[in-house]
Image: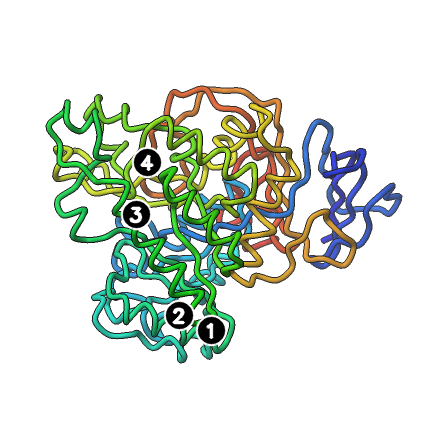
Amino acid sequence: MRLVVRGVALLGASTADILIDEGVIREVGTVKAKADRVIDGAGLIALPGLVDLHTHLREPGGEATETILSGSRAAAAGGFTAVHAMANTSPVADTAQRVELVAELGRRAGFVEVRPVGAVTHNLDGAQLADIGEMARSAAAVTVFSDDGRCVGDALLMRRALEYVSTFGGVIAQHAQDPRLTLDGVMHEGAVSSELGLRGWPSVAEESIIARDVLLAEYVGARLHVCHVSTAGSVDVIRWAKRRGIAVTAEVTPHHLLLTDDAARSYDTVFKVNPPLRTQTDVDELRRAVADGTIDIIATDHAPHSAASKDATWQDAPFGMVGLESALSVVQTTLVDTGAISWADVARILSVTPAVIGRVSGYASPLAVGSPANITLVDPAHRENWTVERVRGRSANTPFVGVPTAGRVMATIFRGRETVVDGDVVDDEEMRTL
């Protein structure tokens, strides 16, 4: 199908038309060719399709809270055209067969490209390396490996993992959490945890692991990626490592750019996340780190949980919140509307750089003729209170219901097909006919 986006704002340029045919951008400028469908791009900004390096799709094993299909729909609603599915499923994605299953289920869903993340250790147990080479050579062609949800705490095992992936250009994505320092911790260790009588989770538990791992990465000449950075001290370590020339990249989640540990005063477990929400000082430093490039990307850490499991005491409830649908709005609110970054920066941190880290081809800014037609159209002037209807996945453990939000994804185009039209996800029957 031939599709034209008419009069849309391009990054670093004036408005233009985009012609899409057979899944490829064929023309950018003034398009006179006839089209099967025309999208009115007036007032919209065209971004390269968003790429999430950190998504929990729960399948296999956790289908009650999310499936690859439902998570793919949520991703499309948020403007994503590629997501990396974390390995902490049941069974764990630690073999070639299991990562190939995840990739195949993503292809069948058809809303986004689903890239499996392989486990670093068998069953995430931190004792023995998983079949990293087999996963890399599999049809899924895994390049990112992580035990996310658990830290690779053994320094020797982490060294071996880094050495292994360095042989084929892979990357280890570390969940930086010293298990001894965070034993029974349920929120940030500080004034609020003391006031509430909840076991604290100190910043140094994250910072010490990052410091160890950047030195290991330097020593063996490997690539390290740090998941969900949450403290000002972690930013200091990463900034030092980059000045030293160490091959480290880092991500921050939208919720760590907006929320603080004060939210725990409500005892609403939707705010219980891993790593925990930190202080305003940490939030301010994380925003500065995104603006100056110390933190390379924003990743959602989309973590679905059932309402029943979250309806528990703070001590007993699981960690995590969903974030695919709300990510771009939070980024606009915290960084774009405050003047910290531009929309071109948004393309870099939510599309181009995560694609480079995860080795997903076809993502560049600005949008160019000959590139795959993975495009997100956002209305930056849109304002509304977030509603639960905006949640397209199976779980609604989000803190943003009823909260005023900025911007909205009006269209998502994945390989030339519209997965979101006028702000609504295309239903499954329609997808099969497109």
Give me the disc on residue 166.
1
Residue closest to the eye, 11 or 289 = 289
Q: Earlier in the sequence, mark 1 or mark 3?
A: 1
> Could you tell me the amino acid type at mark 2?
Leu
How far separated are the C-alphas under marks 3 and 2? 19 Å
| Residue at the spot of label 2 | 162
- Numbered disc in front, either 4 or 2: 2
Numbered circle sitting on residue 206: 3
Residue 45's place in the image compared with 117, above or below, is above
The picture places residue 203, in percent across and down from the top left corner, at 28, 40
Tell me if 290 is positioned left or right of 265 in this view.
Answer: right
Q: Which of 257 and 6 is in front in this view?
A: 257
Mark 4 or mark 2, earlier in chain: 2
Label 2: state its secondary structure.
Answer: helix
Q: Residue at x 57, y 35 (%)?
A: 409
Q: Which of 396 and 196 is in front in this view?
A: 196
Measuring from the top left, give residue 202's x and y in whole percent.
Answer: 23, 40
State the residue position of label 4.
396
Discs 4, 1 touching: Cβ within 8 Å: no
Residue in the image at 81% along x and 46% along y:
28
How far apart are the alpha carbons under marks 4 and 1? 38 Å
Chosen colour scheme: rainbow
Residue type indicated by callout 3: Glu
For badge 4, the amino acid type reads Ala
The quarter holding residue 284 reads top left
Earlier residue among tags 4 and 3: 3
Q: How many labels does the image show?
A: 4
**Sequence order check, earlier mark of 4 and 1:** 1
- What distance separates the C-alpha of mark 4 from that of mark 3? 28 Å
